[in-house]
Amino acid sequence: MSFRLGIIGAGGIAAEHAKAASAIGLEIAGFCDVELAKAEKLAQQYPPAVAVLDINELLELPGIPAVVVATPNHCHKPHTLTALAAGKDVLLEKPMGLNLAECDEIITGMKQSDRFVQVNLVTRQSRMALIAYDFIQSGRLGKIYHAKASWYRRRGIPGLGRWFTTKAESGGGVLIDLGVHEIDLVAHLTGHPRPVRASAHITSNFGKHIDEYSFSDMWSGPPDLDGTCNVDDGAVGLIRYDNGMTLELNVCWAMNLPEKTLPDGITLFGDKGGCYFDTWGEKFVFATEENGHLIDSTPFIPPGNAWDMAWCKQYEAFADAVINRGASPVPAEHGRAAQSVLDALYRSNAEQREVEIPQ
């Protein structure tokens, strides 16, 4: 299972894409980035990959049926539409767009091109999520009536002062960065019920004074002390679904608590059983009742690097869809569904009320 793949973008997330694609046997044909030096650095790691400045030059390389869009969020729509128009399948980094309108434009372009877009919501492929999915499909949880999704960081604002924290370029902060994963994963596990209403309280406390922000490490490089931070760094949300299920969402980039004081992960409440798992960790607990006895159990957890395993599974699924023209495991419509919830949560916070989620 192999083909040549082009990668649009050459930042940290593009490196993750290249690593996973190469690991499953795809050939990296080239990298495109507005900073040519970044593209050249990555290309040197994956010979015979080339480095180019112009997206059209990348798309014209021979033998490329598909590309990755791993650029800043505000570039997702134009780069994806350009790739689709050139006849390429697209693996699109999350979030799908800055807002629901951009998602709709991408879907229109996709339908006109007869190509497909897969959104890189990789948490679906984590080993813990796969175990939970099997539990749910077997009926062991019964009807899931509530879910709780949490992802906390003590000091985890990415790329402070650059595009990550500039709303016009990112579309938002922690909610659109981490929240999109949690919203999508719960939807995936519970059979994609239709979200109907949302309420949120969103905060921005830690990035306002960039030169005073303390951190131990930072995704996407050190802070730009002259840059901008006008996005959220904390969010609490409640989402209601048409089947009666609710989701409590808690995400933050920064807080004044030691790491792991509050547990990360997904909790699912079912009328036959419940489970909790740390998406990227080692803990999975299933609880139920059998013959009048309360039963707690832990399933077998496959060994290995959870992150690398999930990325490779995501790429195997993408490669299969490209080669065999099957259905994408994370179709554009699912990326749109997650974006509809994000848009509603931001609107709820702005209007200080529960709002309808656009369909």
Image: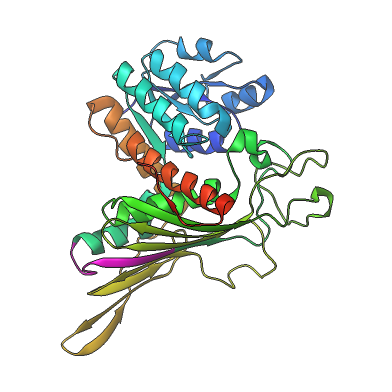
Check the image and report above or below for 215 versus 105. Answer: below
Magenta region includes residue 54: no
x and y, in percent, of residue 109 in the image:
37, 20
Quadrant, the C terminus = top left
Question: Between residues 285 and 348, which one lies in front from this camera angle?
Answer: 348
Please tell me in which quadrant of the rendered image residue 10 appears. top right
Residue at image x 37%, y 60%? 128
Whether residue 348 sits left or right of residue 284 in the image: it is right
Question: Between residues 193 and 27, which one lies in front from this camera angle?
Answer: 193
Quadrant, the N terminus = top left
Res 3 seen here? no
Extreme residue in the bottom direction? 292
Residue at image x 46%, y 64%? 265
Check the image and report above or below for 170 versus 29. Answer: below
Res 145 seen here? yes
Residue at image x 52%, y 31%? 70
Please tell me in which quadrant of the rendered image residue 288 appears. bottom left
Query: Magenta region: which residues?
Result: 138-148
Magenta region includes residue 145: yes
Whether residue 170 sits left or right of residue 263 in the image: it is right
Check the image and report above or below for 267 versus 290. Answer: above
Check the image and report above or below for 160 versus 107. Answer: below
x and y, in percent, of residue 262 in the image:
56, 71
